[in-house]
Image (cartoon, rainbow, N blue to C red):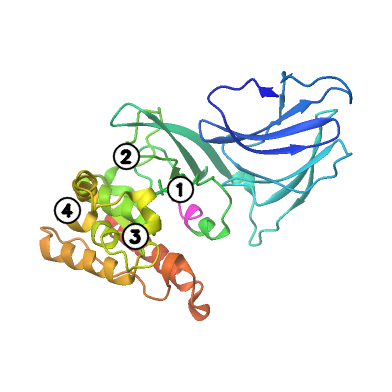
Amino acid sequence: MCLSLTSVCIQEMQPFSDHLVVYERENGLPKISIYCLPPIGEPLDTLRGGRTVNFIDPVYSVDSSESQFYSSILRFFYSSMRTPSSVYDYDMNSGTLVLKKIDAVFGGFDSANYITQRVWATATDGTQTPISVVYRKDLVKLDGSDPLILYGYGSYEICVDPYFKESRLSLLDRGFIFAVAHIRGGVKWGDHGNKYCSTEKLCIERRSAGGLLIGAVINMRPDLFKAAVAGVPLVDVLTTMLDPTIPLTTSEWEEWSDPRKEEFYFYMRSYSPVDNIHGSYSEAAKFVAKLREMKTDDNMNLVPDIFQNLDGKNVKSFECFPKICIFLYLSTILFFLKN
């Protein structure tokens, strides 16, 4: 059997008695395609003319759910940066999409107040990189004066889909723009007609391996960002990957390369944040100490929280504390700008 697809990543297949459902990803965006199967006994060579499920938002997240094999109804989970987690049933014969359930959001939330968009940025090598954006339409001007938090990861081939997060509303309802860069390498903002923010309003945030990204880009282009949050960041990647006694180090060589080999050592050193000026919290503390020693401005450098262990597994008593600290820090930085 052959699917007639080009430039598409097939993530999952779900067979039914009369249909084949294919969960795909094209240009980083998830898709669901429905193919009709021939009657039992007829040969199956090539599937053609698949029907694509249409969604209400330009950027979104989709996950499969269990469905009945002998049914024509496909059930799946849906979410976007302005749409809470939802359950949909899709009739594969008629093409009818029915909302079955949506998570309740309290506090007068109305998804119609928010806009989600997909824009593109140009990497240094010319690659077009998609960016998912959400903002509250009655609070932003899109003239460069709006504060923006840019979120990125870029490791382990993980796709950070633009899903709904209730805690994010606290920022959106204060006039912030939130953006997710779907990256595999460095990007810069392109010309999209709208001016989402300026360097004086741009904040970046991520954790763990994404903290390596944060550390690397603020070393490469410190002029681009007003504030950065790097949670339990892997900012001393070279030292960490040279120590095989640290748990997970040897298994991580496939992702980061083995710095015991000269060609990889110098490449990794070229972007390792602490070598250019969690693991454990000591990496982040070392990075901040080096920034304080070398900096030539009056910007704040804060030691990251220690209420969480590796990759954000919270100590129960402080579940909400780290996120509150991040929001307060970013809001304080941008509040000072206005005064």
For residue 49, side relative to residue 269 (left or right):
right
Q: Are marks 1 and 3 in contact (CB under 8 Å)?
A: no
Label 2 CA crowd tier, 10 Å (few <14, some 14–19, many 20+): some
In the depicted structure, whether residue 289 falls above or below residue 128: below
- Name the front one of labels 1 and 4: 4
For the residues labelled 2 and 1, the Cα–Cα distance comes to 18 Å
Secondary element type, mark 2: loop
Mark 4, residues whose alpha carbon is within 10 Å: few (<14), some, or many (≥20)? some
Q: Which residues are magenta?
A: 171-177
Neighbourhood count class around disc 3 (C-alpha, 10 Å): few under 14, some 14–19, many 20 upward: many
Query: Residue at point 37% right, 60% down?
Result: 331
The numbered mark, 1 or 3, whose residue comes first in the sequence reads 1
What residue sits right under mark 2 in the picture?
A: 186
Q: Is residue 212 left or right of residue 180?
A: left
Q: Look at the image and tell me whether residue 235 can be seen.
A: no
The span from disc 1 to disc 4 (Cα, nearest Å) is 28 Å
Q: Quadrant of the C terminus?
A: bottom left
Q: Amino acid at mark 2?
A: Gly
First along the sequence among labels 2 and 4: 2
For the residue labelled by badge 1, is the local secondary structure a helix, a strand or a loop? strand
The x and y percentages for residue 243 are: 27, 64
Residue 259 position, x and y percent, is 25, 52
Which quadrant holds the N terminus? top right
- Where residue 206 appears, x then y in whole percent? 39, 55
- Indicate the amino acid at tag 1: Phe
Q: Which mark is residue 178?
A: 1
Identity, as a three-letter code, of the amino acid under mark 4: Asn
For the residue pair 267 and 287, the one nearer the viewer reads as 267
Q: Amino acid at mark 3?
A: Ala
Q: CA distance from mark 3 to mark 4?
A: 16 Å
Q: Earlier in the sequence, mark 1 or mark 4?
A: 1
